[in-house]
Image (spheres, grey):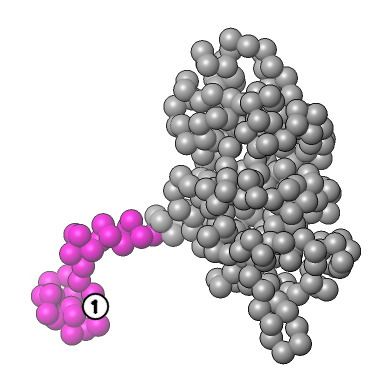
Amino acid sequence: MDLNMTVGQLIEAGGEVKSPQRVNSDKAYKKRMSQQDPRSFVQVNDRGVVHVKSTLNLTQAGTLFSLMAYLDDKDGNLVFRGERLGTEQLSKLLSVSKTSLKRNISELVNLGYVIDEKVGRKVFYSVNPQIAKRGVRTEKDLFSKLYNVHLRELIQKLTVQELGFLFLMIPYFNTKYYTLCQNPYELNSSKVELFDRERFAEEVGLSLVQVKRLIANLLKKQALIGLRTCRTAIIISPKLVSRQQKFVSIEEVTDIIGNELNVKERMQW
């Protein structure tokens, strides 16, 4: 290339001229693209989940959560290996009886969380996009990434009630630190206030006995992580849920446990 070419000559030769603003814009675009998560995920509306908890029991919530593992279509359709899913296929994938699944999905349809569509003699399902939708990139603050592949693995290990409880917990995990807390959008570790089991039981409308049992089971099955010093912080596995590219460190979580809001009481789950 002749370094003495004019702009006009360069363009005529098939070249391209970019303004400084265009160069900066292209750099910003490449940076955004490099930060996109290559893993398949569902974008879950945290406020939608908070609303769900007041209308569903644990079995129904667990069923809705399970369906999201196959939400792999921009229109909210449930899909596996390129084929839309009905009750029969879902019952096999989720390892539950067709009768039980049909009953629970019927309740979800009546409440508007799931949409049914009859095509010929078959009925297919999709998830209401106000609750969750297929992810390409996630919005900030009020949305969580839910990774399809890991959720499918958990479905094979957890009971439907454990899945329902885990689903109801999602909005209460801190955006930055992944800890179960009362102020999930607080980014200052010195101000993050952890839930204790009594308050959390009240928040989700379950008995203390249920919460203790379900937390213990989820820890044992590695759906949750517990970090214990003077008290225990409950952390959701970043393999399942994420809101950011950065992973939380042990030091950051211990800072939260030791802040003035949390160190005043010893509390185990």
Q: Quadrant of residue 83?
A: bottom right
Magenta span? 1-30
Question: In the image, is 19 to the left or to the right of 85?
Answer: left
Instruction: Give the quarter of the figure containing the C terminus.
Output: top right
Question: In the image, is 227 to the left or to the right of 162?
Answer: left
Q: Is residue 174 above or below residue 85?
A: above
Residue 93 shows up from this direction: no
Q: Is residue 51 above or below residue 94?
A: above
Q: Is residue 109 above or below residue 12?
A: above
Tell me the element at label 1: loop
Residue at x-position 73% and y-position 79%: 123
In the image shown, does 249 or 127 lie closer to the viewer? 127
**Mark 1 residue type:** Gly
Magenta-drawn stretch contains 24 = yes
Residue at x-position 44% and y-position 48%: 140
Mark 1 = which residue?
15
Residue 68 shows up from this direction: yes
Q: Quadrant of residue 75?
A: bottom right
In the image shown, does 166 or 80 lie closer to the viewer? 166
